[in-house]
Amino acid sequence: MNVSRNGSYEDMINLPRPESSRPPMPRADRAKIFSPFAALRGYGKAVRDMETIRINKPERFEEQKEALNRKLKFLENGEMVTVCYFCPDPGPDGSGGTAQGNFQTVSGTVRNIDTVFQLLKLNDLVIPFDDIWDITGEDIPEM
C-alpha cells in the first residue's frame, strides 16, 4: 500500500470491489441486525408507575352511603351497569398501602351480588361494597 504525500491511496483507488463467497443476506434478516432493543428492561413500566396519580381514599357521608345502599338494592343479576369504584394501589414501592389508589370506572354485567361478604361481581371483576363510589344503570334511579 503506497500512501502519497497528499494522503490518497492511489494504488487501491481503482481496484474492483471484493466479492463475497457467501450469498447475500435477505433484507428482512438484515433489518433485524439494526432493530432497537430494550437496554433497560422494565424501565418504561417503572416510569409509568411513578406517573400514576394516587390519592387517599375519601370518606363518604352518611347520605352518600344510604344512597349507594338504595342503588345496590335495585341491582339484579344480568343487568348492565357502570360502576365507579376506588381501586387500591400501593404504588411501585408498596409504601401506599390500601389507603391510596385511584378511581376506576367500569361497565359490565352484574354476575353476583354477595350481601354476606359485601361484594359485587361485575363480569370477572370483584368489587367490595366499601370501594364502590357510584353505580349507574338503565333500571337504577338517580338519587
Image (cartoon, rainbow, N blue to C red):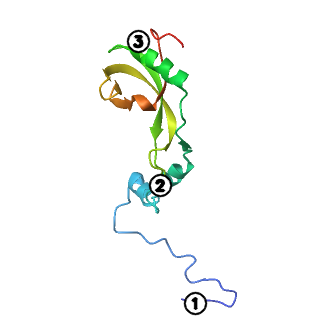
Query: Where does the image place residue 92, in percent across and percent down from the top left?
Result: 47, 53
Q: How crowded is mark 1: few (under 14 residues within 10 Å), some or many (20 or more)?
A: few
Q: Mark 2 and mark 3: span between their CA atoms?
A: 38 Å
Q: Nearer the viewer, mark 1 or mark 3?
A: 3
Q: Which amino acid does label 2 sit on?
A: Ser
Quick check: 29 above or below 66?
Answer: below
What amino acid does circle 1 point to?
Asn
Tell me which residue sits at (38%, 59%) in the image. Answer: 25
Which comes before the other along the chain, label 2 or label 3?
3
Query: What amino acid type is highlighted by mark number 3?
Result: Phe
Residue 122 visible in the current orientation: no
Q: Earlier in the sequence, mark 1 or mark 2?
A: 1
At horizontal 35% and vertical 27% (from top left) the residue drawn is 118
Q: How far apart are the two marked residues, 1 and 3, measured between alpha carbons?
A: 95 Å
Which numbered tag is attached to residue 74? 3
Q: Dot 2, how many residues are within 10 Å of its Cα: few (below 14), some (14-19), or many (20+)?
A: few
Determine the secondary structure under disc 2.
Answer: loop
In the displayed structure image, the side of residue 18 where residue 76 appears, left or right: left
- The residues tagged by marks 1 and 2 sit, at their Cα atoms, a distance apart of 70 Å
Q: Name the residue under label 2.
A: 95
Residue at the spot of label 1: 2
Q: Which residue does the image show at 34% across and 68% down from the upper left?
A: 21
- Seen in the picture, residue 26 relative to 133 is either above or below; the reply is below
